Amino acid sequence: MKPGFRKKIYAGFFSLLLIQGLVLFFWVSHVMKSSLLQEIKNRGISIGTILSARMVEPMLAMDFLRMRVLLDETVQLEQDIFYTFVLDKEGRPLIHTFDRGFPTALKHLNSVSDDHNGSMKLLDTGDKLFYDYALPVAIDTHRLGTLRLGLLRTRAEKAVAKIMVSAVVSIVFTIFIAGIVGTILLNPITKSIKKLHESSEQALRGNLDVKTAPMLGKNCWDIMNCHKNQCPAYKNYHHRCWYMAGTLCPTCVEGEYAKKIDSCRQCQVYRKCSGDEIQSLAESFDAMTLSLKGNLSSLKDAEAVLNEQKARLQTILDAIPDFISLQDDKGRYISVNKAFCDMLNKEKEDIVGKFNDDLFPPGLTRQYNKEDRQLFTSGLPLIKENKIMDEKGISWLHVVKIAVMDGSDKVAGLVCSGRDITQLKAVQEQLTHAQKMESVGRLAAGVAHEINTPLGIILGYAQILLEDVEQEGQIHDDVATIVKQTRICSRIVADLLSFSRSRENIISEFDMNGAIDEVLDVVVHTFGLHHVDIHRSYYPGPLKIRGDKEKLKQVCINLLNNAFDAIEQDGVISIHTDLEATAREITISISDTGHGISRENIVKIFEPFYTTKGPDKGTGLGLSVTFGIIKEHNGSIDVFSPPLSFLETGTHGQGTQFVVTLPTGLD
């Protein structure tokens, strides 16, 4: 566990004092020791100089008694003198103060030349350190001998030791006193910091009523002699008035802390009540918790209102029969209503957070993802009708997808709404069929009433006449023409009845190439009699599709008959099939080399009863029936005249090309 702030302050404070004391200790010790040793050196030189001067007279007289007395007096006066002796000019000892004999080795350890005043060396006997002084005894330039003096360092070392002890005691005492003073000064700071830390932990736990700042001895209402009970600072002992908004002091500026603090610093309340940095930090913390409490209260109220509105909106959305969904910019579903859940037969929790791939079959997933990508790219709304085929049967959905824009006009999501229009479609289909049947019924009834009876009579009498007249003659040919034209009229009536008739689709899976071959097997002989060739270019593999085989064969028959009628004689009909694997769609192209269709007629060819053929060659219902069958299979049909190949290559030619696009209906 890391040490706390208090321990760190103490450790730093005492470390600083200790380092300062050690530096002071070593510096004082060094200075004192150097000073004492220098004093000892100077004292030894002074004693030796005086004694060598006093030795001149006894040495001239060779008065050994006098020399002895001088040495003894000197030793008695200075307790630190270890020894003293006198050498003659040849270096022989004349007198000394040694009790156990003169150590001969000592006289060679230090010497002085005639031209020097003296020499000093520090000698060590193993248990004692002393300074050895060698001074010449001379009269003017005449050398009489040498005075040697040994001065112990014992007293100097004792003095230095005492000084060091005194310094250590002083340093320890200083640190102790500093520790007491530091404790007295640091206790309020560390207590305030500890209280601030505890308050911050309480605030993190959600308790924003903590009080950290100390109580003031005199508050703003006492200083200003104020009795405004409605002021938010009145009788508020824990929050400073300069942190509070809406105070009623005449000198206060309206607004929050940032707006009023400059004026508050000039107020006598601030000058008297504001404290040091620690107190200011505690006061700021209390103001912050008070502000947070107010903001959190506002946020909670807003959250409650939002949750209530959200629940109300969800209730409204769930009550709407239309299904509604909301996707984010990744295509993830973030909100759906009950109708959407019912449509997928899933719970809301199983849908929110999922993608199209998780909710729909592969075929629908590809379609929906493609539509979503287009919406994210263009931002344009999508309105469509979806035909859904499942185990329950066929259903129709009217779907509207709208891009949701963010503040920077970027697509942030998609809103999709839709409703089941199966019943509406059925009603519309029934109504359309009823209207058609009503019109066709009236027309057919009129034709049957006005034409069929006369036609029957005409056809009957014409056939009787045909049998009675000679076969080789003009009359026989004329009567045969009457029979032929009467039968054409009968066929027109039959086509009208076929157009008005409706039957249920028989859905199955089959090979479209094979179905086309079945149609060609029926018409190829007839086409060949008129020198109309059929060129086939099929998709190399099986062209599987799910639909009503007989109705799609009827589409091929109608388109082939139109191509044959447009060629009449000597021409080519080309049939091409292909598969778009990505979109799962097949295309059937039937083109001819006939006379083509004009631009003004091409927009009308799918209208009922519209035809460009002669009166005896068509009823105008074939392409209308073809268009209806293709729409029933969710497909499309396009017409190009001249054919698309000519338009792409820029070549000139005649003819017409019908391109039928049909979904495979396979997953």
Image (spheres, rainbow, N blue to C red):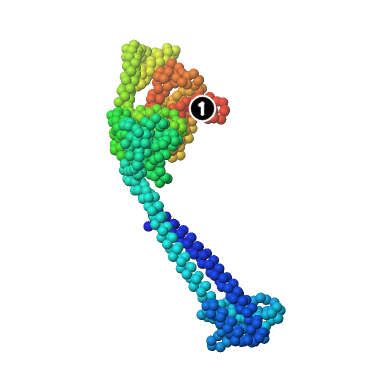
The image shows residue 163 at horizontal and vertical percentages of: 48, 68
Along the line of sight, the residue nearer the viewer: 19 or 196: 19
In the rendered view, does 35 fall on the left or right side of 208? right
Q: How many marks?
A: 1
Q: Is residue 465 above or below residue 124?
A: above
Picture quadrant where residue 261 is located:
top left
The image shows residue 87 at horizontal and vertical percentages of: 63, 84
Q: Residue at x 31, y 23 (%)?
A: 427
Along the line of sight, the residue nearer the viewer: 309 or 42: 42
Tag 1: amino acid: Pro
Q: Is residue 447 above or below residue 105?
A: above
Along the line of sight, the residue nearer the viewer: 370 or 520: 370
Can you name the residue that lies furthest to the bottom here?
A: 101
User: The N terminus appears in which quarter of the rendering?
Assistant: bottom left
Picture quadrant where residue 494 is located:
top left
Q: Is residue 302 visible?
A: no
The image shows residue 409 at horizontal and vertical percentages of: 46, 31
Instruction: Determine which residue is flagged by label 1.
Output: 643
SS category of the residue bearing label 1: loop
Q: Residue at x 50, y 70 (%)?
A: 160
